[in-house]
């Protein structure tokens, strides 16, 4: 079984990269294979062009590869910082270009696009790990925790994945080394919970 891991942070020394590496190591230790993409390192182009809009468009090879991987994945893990209550633009562009009709969702016969789509993704679980410099209480009370809505409701929920888990690590800018070690232990525990060895 393969798990798709998408990382979106421009700094290779970032805590996001440490999270992603922990995810990769934990999954491999549990016997899974991974599709891993560091979008910044790969210089992923986030721009959705007119030629890709239609469901039956002929896609560039790199986008077709991403689509095939996400469609085949038994699980999905996304790692990114909270920037203005949103994913980085490069990751939003990845969603635009890869989480597309015919791959992640479809509209049923007679529905011209105004209804609720039928999800196509086969992953049994989706995990999102975020970093933030905003306290959790402020994130929820003032901003309404927009990343939860984006990933749970607007993306994975509509694409057929109801087993969803998201964890926010904050406040990163003032965190200690011991605190970050504890956070990485939490990442390992989450992987063991959602992708345990005995279900490979």
Image (cartoon, grey):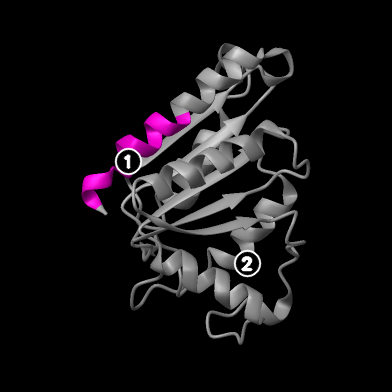
What residue is shown at x 37% (from left), y 54% (from top)? Answer: 32
What residue is shown at x 54% (from left), y 42% (from top)? Answer: 150
Q: Secondary structure at mark 1?
A: helix
- Give the camera-side residue of 145 and 163: 163
Give residue 144's position: percent from left, percent from top: 56, 25
Q: Is residue 78 left or right of residue 62?
A: left
> Counting other residues with Cα less than 10 Å from the Cα at mark 1, is it few (<14), some (14-19), or many (20 or more)?
some
- Give the camera-side residue of 169 and 139: 169
Q: Which mark is residue 194?
A: 1
Among the 4 quarters of the image, the one containing residue 94:
bottom right
Give residue 133's position: percent from left, percent from top: 70, 20
Residue range (magenta):
187-199
Which of marks 2 and 1 precedes in the sequence? 2
Give residue 177's position: percent from left, percent from top: 65, 16
Give residue 134's position: percent from left, percent from top: 67, 18
Residue 105: in sight, yes or no?
Answer: no
Residue 128: in sight, yes or no?
Answer: yes
Kindly report which numbered mark, 1 or 2, lies closer to the viewer in this rendering: 1
Q: Secondary structure at mark 2?
A: helix
Please tell me whether residue 177 belongs to the stretch shown in magenta: no
* Magenta stretch prevailing secondary structure: helix
Q: Which mark is residue 97?
A: 2
């Amino acid at each position: 079984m393969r798990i798709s891991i998408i990382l979106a942070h421009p700094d290779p020394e970032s805590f996001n990269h440490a999270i992603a590496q922990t995810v990769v190591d934990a999954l491999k230790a549990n016997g899974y294979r991974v599709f891993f993409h560091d979008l910044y390192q790969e210089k992923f182009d986030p721009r959705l062009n007119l030629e890709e809009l239609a469901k039956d468009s002929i896609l560039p090879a790199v986008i077709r590869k991403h689509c095939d991987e996400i469609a085949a994945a038994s699980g999905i893990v996304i790692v990114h910082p909270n920037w203005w209550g949103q994913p980085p633009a490069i990751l939003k562009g990845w969603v635009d270009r890869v989480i597309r009709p015919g791959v992640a969702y479809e509209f049923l016969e007679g529905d011209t696009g105004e209804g609720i789509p039928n999800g196509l993704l086969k992953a049994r679980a989706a995990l999102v790990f975020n970093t933030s410099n905003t306290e959790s209480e402020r994130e929820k009370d003032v901003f309404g925790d927009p990343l939860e809505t984006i990933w749970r409701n607007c993306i994975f929920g509509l694409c057929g994945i109801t087993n969803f888990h998201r964890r926010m690590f904050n406040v990163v800018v003032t965190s200690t080394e011991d605190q970050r070690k504890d956070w990485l232990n939490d990442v390992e525990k989450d992987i063991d919970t959602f992708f345990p060895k005995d279900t490979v």
